[in-house]
Amino acid sequence: MRHLKHRHKLGVKTAHRGALLANLTASLILHKRIQTTLAKAKALRPFAEQVITLAKKAHAAEDPARKLHYRRLAVSKVRDQEAVALLFSERVEEFLNRPGGYTRIYKLVPRQGDAANVAIIELIDADDEGYTKPKKTRKRSRRSSKKAEASAEESTKEEAPAAESAEAPATEATAEESAEATSEESGSEKK
């Protein structure tokens, strides 16, 4: 069974894929931002983040043998001495306070020649807070808005009879007073 065998194959052999990811990682470290296909960017992200984690471990290690060990592991993955030296000396300081998520992928419009999905993958700066999504306001469905209107109408109907009952004694009192007043007037006229 092929359980837990998911990999980004990229349509190439294993050795080709390893060389491709190593070269993309070296370019990403050197230039901080590269443009490639979306599939390659998605495959590159975990590979590059593993190398950056090795650099962070080397920076935190106190034993020089440990630092050398992590550097050699990174060189075996990236296969570019210059990129690894830059990562371990300068770029690692940008990621010390970040627990993960060192890269960001932006999707671009499809490429004109073959309509391939293109993306930009970049290293995130230390002071970058990222894009904050605006809070969404919930849209009420028709049914829920109708229910809200119906409940509002019911509450106003309940308040209306209560208001009428409060006004009703006053109306009755005025009716009695008017009846007395008319009877007095009619009685005074009869005299």
Image (cartoon, grey):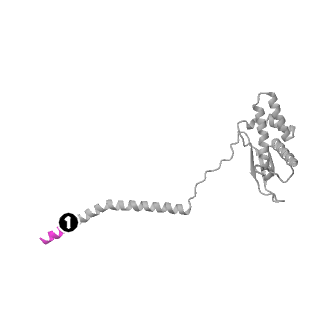
Residue at 55%, 63% (x, y): give it: 142
Horizontal and vertical percent for residue 91?
78, 37
Q: Is residue 59 left or right of residue 20?
A: left
Q: Name the residue under label 1.
A: 180
Magenta stretch encompasses residue 164? no
Question: Callout 1: helix, strand or loop?
Answer: helix
Residue at 22%, 67% (x, y): give it: 179
Main SS category, magenta section: helix
Residue found farthest to the bottom: 190
- In the image, is residue 149 above or below residue 123? below
Q: Can residue 51 be seen in this view?
A: yes
Picture quadrant where residue 60 is located: top right
Mark 1 Cα-neighbour bin, 10 Å: few <14, some 14–19, many ≥20: few
- In the image, is residue 184 above or below residue 42? below
Residue found farthest to the top: 63
Horizontal and vertical percent for residue 70?
81, 34
Q: In this view, does 81 lie to the left or right of 109?
A: right
Q: Can residue 37 be seen in this view?
A: no
Picture quadrant where residue 130 is located: top right
Horizontal and vertical percent for residue 40?
81, 50
Residue at 35%, 60% (x, y): give it: 163
- Between 117 and 49, the one lying in front of the other is 49
Q: In this view, does 160 lie to the left or right of 9?
A: left
Quarter of the figure that contains the C terminus: bottom left
Magenta stretch encompasses residue 190? yes
Horizontal and vertical percent for residue 162?
35, 60
Residue stretch rendered in magenta on the structure:
180-191
Number of callouts in the render? 1
Q: In this view, does 5 lie to the left or right of 19?
A: left
- The residue under label 1 is which amino acid type? Glu
Picture quadrant where residue 85 is located: top right
Residue at 79%, 35% (x, y): give it: 90
